[in-house]
Amino acid sequence: MVAKTLRRYDLTPQRLLFLGLLAAFALAFLFYPLGFTLTKAFWVPDPAGGARFTVAVFLLMFTDPANWELILNSINLALAVTLLTTLLAVPMAWVTNRYAFPLKGLMTGLLLVPLVLPPFVGAVGMKQMFARFGSFNLLLVDAGVVSQPVDWLGGGFWATAILEVLHLYPILYMSVAAALANIDPNMEEAARNLGASGFCLFRRITWPLMLPGYYAGAVIVFIWSLTDLGTPLILDYRNLIPVRIFNMLTDINQNPMGYCLVVFMILLTAGIFFLSKIVLGDRGYTSATRGHVTPPVRPAGWVGSALILGGLGLVTLIALVPHISVILTSLSRRWFMTVLPTLYTGAHYEAVFRQELTWLAINNSLFLSALSTVVDICLGIAIAWLLLRTRIPGRSVIDTLTMLPLAIPGIIMAFGYLTAFANTPLDAAANPLPLLVIGYAVRRLPYMVRAAYAGFQQTGVALEEAARNCGAGPLTTLRRITIPLVMANLIAGAILCFSFAMLEVSDSLVLAVREQYYPVTKAIYALFGRPDGAFVASAMGVLGMLLLAASLVVAGRFLGKRMGELFRIG
């Protein structure tokens, strides 16, 4: 029976060993931290020195009005961000997919620019631009529009929401645009022949067909905005679950409420993720088999083109405000009570490489990101090859497992690492570098797997079979034939893994508790709390923005239209 199973599934001893190691890695660094958090939330110490199961502490979370305010604020923020992102992304995806207009390529490219500036860094520019005595208020006062400065940040809620919308709408835009491009135009044409048009056509035909793509992007937007830690910290909006969890890390051993908040967030995000699967799982919202059929593109005309360009240009301009503000802050020598800086300097960029904290943080991030990228490359190639080139049991389980980190918020994983490995050789309080490497690798592994998977899909097996017929073993074939053929995809995936690891927020803020181990994002956060530190922090943010922009451009050149698949859960 064992021999038949091995022949059926290609289960060689080497593959069994790798699957065992992969399962052990997932158990140790994915499921164990989550299980530890669940245990601490429901098992409390008893007087006898043991532990007993109870839901009292978890239920107490819902009886405390302060906790209810946290929960409602976090959910309302995520709902507001998702709704506003939908109102932006869906119309833009529709017009760019269905209409031809001048400068279309340039405008669609500019719509993706907000991805290069994490909202954590953009918050620095947002405060400079829209604070009570920021540039926007001073401009309005000078123009006589208002007599007194306006509190545009509004206590932090709407400032956080808008900044996250401006960063996240490209993800939903790419997902919806890909879904619209995959719709069979014959189905819409048939509906028009039956008398449907305008909004009725969109509601009855187009929207149901694009719904899976919309949900794929909307789930990421909701979870990301629900669990974002860096943006509310910089904007000083503290009444959210992630910020409360971050603030409770110092007394987590005395107060189990932090564990309960993490468990609640796990249940909420998991429920949203699986609800989307249930809602869409049994629906036949698929396009007919159609080969390579492109949707009809209609000329927008002069009036339509002007409206489209005006709308897209306005969105792009607003989305670039944090970028512009961060750049101006990084170059300003004096910027106080004026619309624009009165003196400019490049000294803040020199300080990035001269100050001990910033230089050490850059070296730490380079080391951590490079090492985690090597881990992702090795695991990503092996997993993608097993999924596409072998017959092994549980391929769907392995595929889901590798994409799971996209659905688990970073603050939850970082919290689990910090608490589950305390008082062990991996204790982050003593040396966070091993857990930072593992955390970066786990969080970015889906990008590498998807990039390698796309490369293997595009590469035929004829050359690999020819190599095996000539006596080459599986590893030799992979090293000499397959990897060179998919090298472009591997480079793209590696660049994305490295650049996103350089700007990782949650793991860096939570795990790096000692200054000598600070990565770039933790250094930016620390600098922002110092007098005049915002200038050097902005300079570091600009350098990170340039790195991420170059990475996305290079990765886009290699991956093309498959780029959007890297940001989809499932």
Image: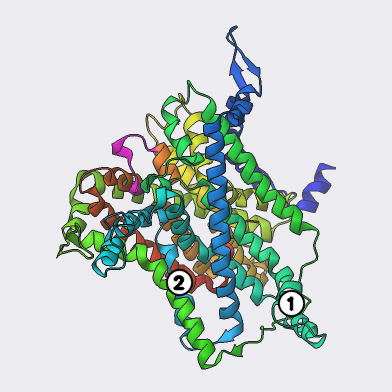
Q: Nearer the viewer, mark 1 or mark 2?
A: 1
Residue for point 53% across, 50% down: 77
570, above or below 310, in the image: above
Q: Which residue position holds label 1?
A: 200
At horizontal 63% and vertical 43% (from top left) the residue drawn is: 268
Q: Is the residue marked by circle 2 packed among few (<14), some (14-19), or many (20+) residues within 10 Å?
A: some
- Disc on res. 315: 2
Q: Is residue 29 visible?
A: no
- Please report the residue visible at 65 percent of the width from the left and 74 percent of the height from the top: 180
Report how far apart the C-alphas of labels 1 and 2 lie in the structure. Answer: 27 Å
Q: Earlier in the sequence, mark 1 or mark 2?
A: 1
* Region of the chain picked out in magenta, as a range: 512-521
Q: Residue 170: give x, y in percent of width and height.
A: 51, 66
SS under mark 2? helix
The 10 Å Cα crowd at callout 1, few under 14, some 14 to 19, many 20 or more, is: few
Residue 421, above or below 369: above
Q: Secondary structure at mark 1?
A: helix
Q: Residue furthest right?
A: 1
